[in-house]
Image (cartoon, rainbow, N blue to C red):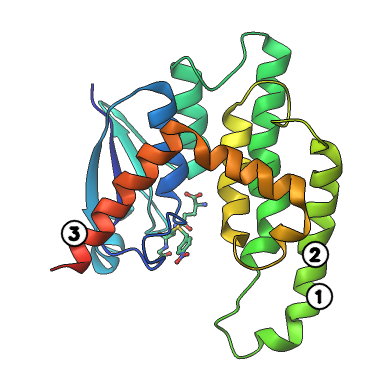
Amino acid sequence: MLPTITVFERSPDGGKGLARDMPVRWALEEVGQSYGVRLVSSRAMKEPAHRALQPFGQIPTYEEGDLALFESGAIVFHIAEHHAGLLPGDANARARAFTWVFAALSTVEPPIVNRGFDEPWYEQRRPVVEEGIRNRLGDLSSRLGDAGWLDGAFSAGDLMMVSVLRRLKGSGILEEYPNLSAYVSRGEARPAFQRAFAAQLAVFTSVSAD
Ligand code: GTB
C-alpha cells in the first residue's frame, strides 16, 4: 500500500527543505518506499478533515491503509521499524538509534527553534538563546568527534539529527563546529536526501510559478 504524506502547499521555507515533511520524505527515500503527497493549504490545515489526521492542524501526516500517523519523529520511527535501511540489526543498537531520534527532537531541537529571529524581541534574547544552542552543539560535537555518524552506521538517529541541525545552516553557529558542519554535509550528500530535497523543491517551484 502506497503511503501518502501531507506537506505545505506553499512552504514558508522558500524551498530550503526545512519543514518537517523533509525527514519523512528522506526516510522513505532511504528505505526505497515510494509515496504519494497531498498538498495542504494553511487554511485547510486547520479544518476538521485535516485535524482528524493531525489534531494540532500541522503537517506532516502519514497515511498507509488503515494507519494514520502524525509527528515527524513517530512517522520516521514507523518507517524505520517496517523497512530495512535505517536501523542496525542488533536490538541494543536499534534502541540507541531511536535514542538519537529522541535526542535530536527533544534535546537538540528546542533551543534551535527558539531562534525567533523575525520577532522584534529577539535581539534582546539572542545571547541567551544562542548560548543554549552552543551548549547543545558543543556536547554533540564532542560526542561525534571524528566519527562519520553518531553510532556506527548511518541510522534514523542521524537522519533526524541532521534534519534538526540543518535549521542552523547559514546562521554561523553550526559553522563554529566543523565536525557538525561536515556531518550535516555528509547527510545532505546521501542520494536519498538529494531525492527527498528535489521532491520538496519541485512542489515549492511548481506552486510558486502559479
Ligand atoms: N512536532 C510536530 C512534528 O514533528 O511533526 C511539529 C509539526 C510542525 O511544526 N509542523 C509545521 C506546521 O505545520 C511545519 S514544519 N506549521 C503550520 C502551523 O502550525 O500552522 C515547521 C517549520 C515551518 C517553517 C519552517 N521554515 O519556514 O523554515 C521550518 C519548519
Percent x, y for residue 23? Answer: 47, 42
Position of the C terminus by quadrant: bottom left
Q: Amino acid at mark 1?
A: Val
Q: Nearer the viewer, mark 3 or mark 2?
A: 3
**Picture residue at 24% right of the left edge, 43% below the top:** 37
* 41 vs 183: above or below: below
- Few, some or many residues within 10 Å of mark 3 (<14, 14–19, 20+): few
Q: Residue at x 33, y 46 (%)?
A: 198
Residue 181 located left or right of residue 155: right
* Quarter of the image with the N terminus in it: top left
Q: Give the answer, above or below, for where 3 lies relative to 118.
A: above
**Secondary structure category for the residue under label 3:** helix
Q: Which mark is residue 206?
A: 3
Residue type pointed to by label 3:
Ser
User: Which residue position is annotated with label 1?
Assistant: 128
Q: Is residue 59 above or below residue 81?
A: below
The alpha-carbon separation of the residues under discs 2 and 1 comes to: 6 Å
- Which residue is the site of mark 2? 132
Q: Is residue 182 left or right of residue 198?
A: right
**Residue 110 horizontal/vertical position (percent):** 67, 58
Tell me if 75 is positioned left or right of 57 in this view. right
Secondary element at image label 2: helix
Amino acid under disc 2: Gly
Tell me whether circle 2 and circle 1 mark residues in contact (CB < 8 Å): yes
